[in-house]
Amino acid sequence: MKNQFNLSHLVRENVKAMKAYSSARDEFTSSHDNLTFLDANESPFDNNFNRYPDPYQLELKEELASLKSVSATQLMLGNGSDEVLDLIFRAFCEPHQNQVITMPPTYGMYQVLANLNAVEVVNVNLTEGFQINTSAVLDEITSATKLIFISSPNNPSGNVMQINSIKLLLEQFKGLVVIDEAYIDFSSTSSFISELQIYDNLIVTQTFSKALGHAAIRLGVCFAHPSIINVLEKIKPPYNVNQLTQKKALEVIKNYDTVNFQVKITTSERQLLAKQFNEVSFIKQVFPSDANFLLCRVDDANKRYQQLIDLGVIVRNRTQEVGCENCLRISVGTPEQNKKLMLILNQLDQ
Ligand SMILES: Cc1ncc(COP(=O)(O)O)c(C=O)c1O
């Protein structure tokens, strides 16, 4: 069943009414060489970086569109997916009026961005197996609900959400469903990007920070219907993706073999680590992971976390998160780092 999706009912009134910033390059573009640009108050002294970057990142978007088999009009880029997520709040959520649904335990920025944008968060905890409690989510939807956030694979649990649960929400909810696929390249399940033709209310976010190995360049990618993309493009800061980032990202795409090679190593190391963790007596449970980390339940997370720090290994203590009592989240390292980790885990008191 298709929901009655109406984007204009979702966009904030002030966003609908406002005009986007018009940059010097919006007002004049030309491919002619012989022009003297004196319109953007840039420095005239050429050092390769004295001009503003392309505010629409056209070359990068074309490359990404062909890599992901989408149209460039279905893409928006941000300073990390964190900026993309913030822009989604700012475009669609009226402060002090609207609500969003998140599903703990999950990525902490949804809550932070909601607080920043004065938007109420309705938390519907994941089930014990870290799956979506679909009927509970549907029960919490009101006329004030604008966004539902799903992290799949989920941070910190590592699992992917059941496809049918996500599809049910996409079909039943008249607002926007945001699927955060920061870890999708480590998963054997396919991206929801392929569903963009079916669901107009779907937003998928991905990032260069994980499998693509470039957290430092801060590049997040948003995939959605062009009408949603237009709204996000309208409100983003004009030069939010700098030229160094655009250039480096193009290199990453050109050398995609490296990404594939590293993903292969990471997923096989994840499998090996999961097996080895199961043989450590104080690790009580290793949760299935489709990401580049493993969530493990141990006998005493605070104690083990501190012991590991003392021996020079830093993991994430998630014991305070809903459903993650006594859980540590451990990123998969290089084969050498993982060997060192195992040596250290095996030398801790049992
Ligand atoms: C689920 C999830 N989404 C998004 C991000 C952040 O991505 P970016 O570095 O693109 O801002 C993270 C980072 O840990 C994450 O775990």
Image (tube, helix red, strand yellow):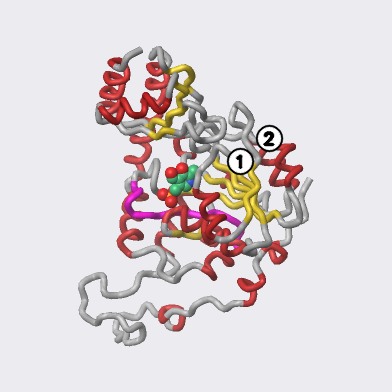
- For the C terminus, the quadrant is top left
Residue that badge 2 annotates: 133
Q: Circle 1 — which element?
A: loop
Depth check: give the residue in front, 62 or 92.
92
**Marks 2 and 1: CB-CB under 8 Å?**
yes
Amino acid type, mark 2: Asn
- For the N terminus, the quadrant is top right
| Residue depicted at x 49% and y 67% | 236
Tell me if residue 337 comes above or below residue 198 in the rendering. above
Whether residue 182 is visible to the viewer of this picture, yes or no, is no
Residue that badge 1 annotates: 103
Q: Position of residue 172 (x, y in %)?
A: 75, 46
Compared across the picture, whether 154 is left or right of 97 comes to: left
Q: Earlier in the sequence, mark 2 or mark 1?
A: 1
Q: Circle 2 — which element?
A: loop
Q: Is residue 221 magenta?
A: yes
Magenta segment boundaries in residue numbering: 214-226
Amino acid type, mark 1: Met
Tell me if residue 272 comes above or below residue 241 in the rendering. above
How many C-alpha atoms fall within 10 Å of the one at disc 1: few (<14), some, or many (≥20)?
many
